[in-house]
Amino acid sequence: MPQPNLPITQLGNPILRQKALPITREQLKDIETRRLITNIKKVLKDSDDLGLAANQINQIVSLFAVNIPPKLMGHRTVGVPLQVIINPKIIERSKEIIDDWEGCLSFNYLRGRVPRHQQVVVEAWNEQGESITIEAYDIYARVLQHEIDHLEGILYLDRMTDLKSLMGLEEFRERNGKEMIVE
Ligand SMILES: [Zn+2]
């Protein structure tokens, strides 16, 4: 995996536990915010990872990027192109819960099984500040829940119901043969 060229905030840094501030329409036009958007897209694109929240690159604002290759998406959609999602809010959650592997760039040496809603509906802005509604299933829904948690200062470790599944990355690769979700 190519190393991102900005340092990723690591587990133990209090920034990962802070609640992100919403972004105003004025702020969205600021040069600082535009720079953040450019940077977060670049860092995510340069990695093989599926999502990255602003506090993972030291900005405590309500923004994250996702990028999901089609091969991971299953039959429902063709993949999620690199996009920035701002001020997200989950407005619907399916009853169905799925347990699957997750990782996180802020503690990339671990993998654990995390229960998530199989489907969510999210209201947000795109990077132009237009309102969007996202209906997401499976991996996309998982990535959205993982990243929205980051904006609340929540890590996937907090969502695990069985810490016994926690595995070191090397052990995980040996046992599973391939790397699964990293966010
Ligand atoms: Zn993460």
Image (spheres, rainbow, N blue to C red):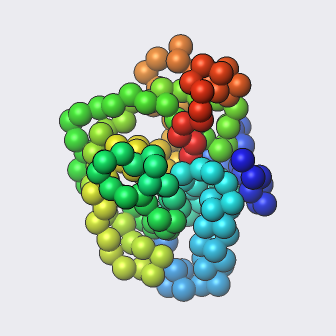
Quadrant location of residue 169?
A: top right
Q: Is residue 137 above or below residue 97?
A: below
Lateral position of residue 113 relative to residue 18, left or right: left
Q: Is residue 131 above or below residue 97?
A: below
Considering every residue shown, the one lying at the far top of the view is: 164
Write the residue at 64% across / 27% down: 173
Write the residue at 38% across / 28% down: 99
Quadrant location of residue 106?
A: top right
Q: Position of residue 77 (x, y in %)?
A: 33, 56
Q: Is residue 145 above or below residue 101?
A: below
Write the residue at 46% across / 49% down: 71
Considering every residue shown, the one lying at the far left of the view is: 95
Q: Position of residue 111 (x, y in %)?
A: 59, 29
Report how many numbered discs are placed on residues in the image: 0
For the residue pair 112 and 175, the one nearer the viewer reads as 175
Q: Is residue 180 above or below residue 37?
A: above
Write the residue at 63% across / 62% down: 45
Lateral position of residue 105 relative to residue 176, left or right: right
Q: Position of residue 161 (x, y in %)?
A: 43, 21
Q: Is residue 117 visible?
A: yes
For the residue pair 140 and 153, the one nearer the viewer reads as 140
For the residue pair 131 and 48, the one nearer the viewer reads as 48
Q: Is residue 155 visible?
A: no
Q: Position of residue 95 (x, y in %)?
A: 21, 36
Lateral position of residue 57 relative to residue 68, left or right: right
Lateral position of residue 74 relative to residue 164, left or right: left
